[in-house]
Image (cartoon, rainbow, N blue to C red):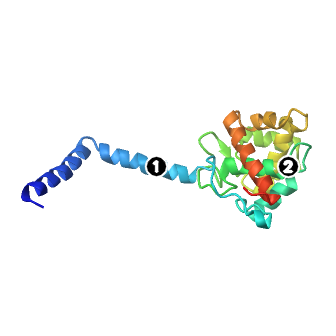
């Protein structure tokens, strides 16, 4: 490399540093990129690629303890099955694995809490209507049956359908689409049909 080429290379490096001094623009961009990547990893609402181990006929993406609870609560009413509950659990908090606020303690930005993300008034409403639901919104053994009752009360038991029930749970068509996508994958995996 000639002396002239080295000077040009140094100027390019220095130029990049100068651009970063003008208010920290380079640092801000790097910080935003890092924050965005972190959110992609942490956000349970984003679909992931891991779903099932078809040969074993079990759902690998769902923790075993959660799968037992989903299956127990899945016959709460006609129209509900364990896979629909698991779809909700996946989208809401990645089956309680998300480290975002409100999953294990406190509330998120919207005021929702627990692995199935209940707002305080909704949690109290479900517990009043179904006293057998346990008191701890953060305990999946209480939250999953509560979610089952809420979906049933929100339309499944009255014959209004799955989408109406999911709309009660979260007023978003993309939310319902994502829950139904996960539920279909879980059913297929459990039947040994792949992900």
First of labels 2, 1 by sequence position? 1
Local packing at callout 2 (Cα closer than 10 Å; few below 14, some 14-19, many 20+) is some
Toward the viewer: 1 or 174?
1
Q: Residue furthest bottom?
A: 56
Q: Residue furthest left?
A: 3
Taking the image as drawn, is residue 7 in sight? Answer: yes
49 to 164, vertically: above or below: below
* Residue 161 horizontal side relative to residue 105, left or right: right
* Residue 132 horizontal side relative to residue 29, left or right: right
Q: Position of residue 163 (x, y in %)?
A: 79, 35
Could you tell me which residue is drawn at 62 percent across and 39 percent down? 110
Could you tell me which residue is drawn at 19 percent across and 47 percent down? 15
Alpha carbon of mark 2 to alpha carbon of mark 1: how far? 36 Å
Q: Position of residue 177 (x, y in %)?
A: 71, 39
Which quadrant, please, contains the C terminus?
Answer: bottom right
Q: Which residue is mark 2?
A: 81
* Residue 169 horizontal side relative to residue 13, left or right: right
Q: Nearer the viewer, mark 2 or mark 1?
A: 2
What secondary structure is marked by label 2?
Answer: loop
Which quadrant holds residue 64? bottom right
| Mark sitting on residue 35 | 1
């Amino acid at each position: 490399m000639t002396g002239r080429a080295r000077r040009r290379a140094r100027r390019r490096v220095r130029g990049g540093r100068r651009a970063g001094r003008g208010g920290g623009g380079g640092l801000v961009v790097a910080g935003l990129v890092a924050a965005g990547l972190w959110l992609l990893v942490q956000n349970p609402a984003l679909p992931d690629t891991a779903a099932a181990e078809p040969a074993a006929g079990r759902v690998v993406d769902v923790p075993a303890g959660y799968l037992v609870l989903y299956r127990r609560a899945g016959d709460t009413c006609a129209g509900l099955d364990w896979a629909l509950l698991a779809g909700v659990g996946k989208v809401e908090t990645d089956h309680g694995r998300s480290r975002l606020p409100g999953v294990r303690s406190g509330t998120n930005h919207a005021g929702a809490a627990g692995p199935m993300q209940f707002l305080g008034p909704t949690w109290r409403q479900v517990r009043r209507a179904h006293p057998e639901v346990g008191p701890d919104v953060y305990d999946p053994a209480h939250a999953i049956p509560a979610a089952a009752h809420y979906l049933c009360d929100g339309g499944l038991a009255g014959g209004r359908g799955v989408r109406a029930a999911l709309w009660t749970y979260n007023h978003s068509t993309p939310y319902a689409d994502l829950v139904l996508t996960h539920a279909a994958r879980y059913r297929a995996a459990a039947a040994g049909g792949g992900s």
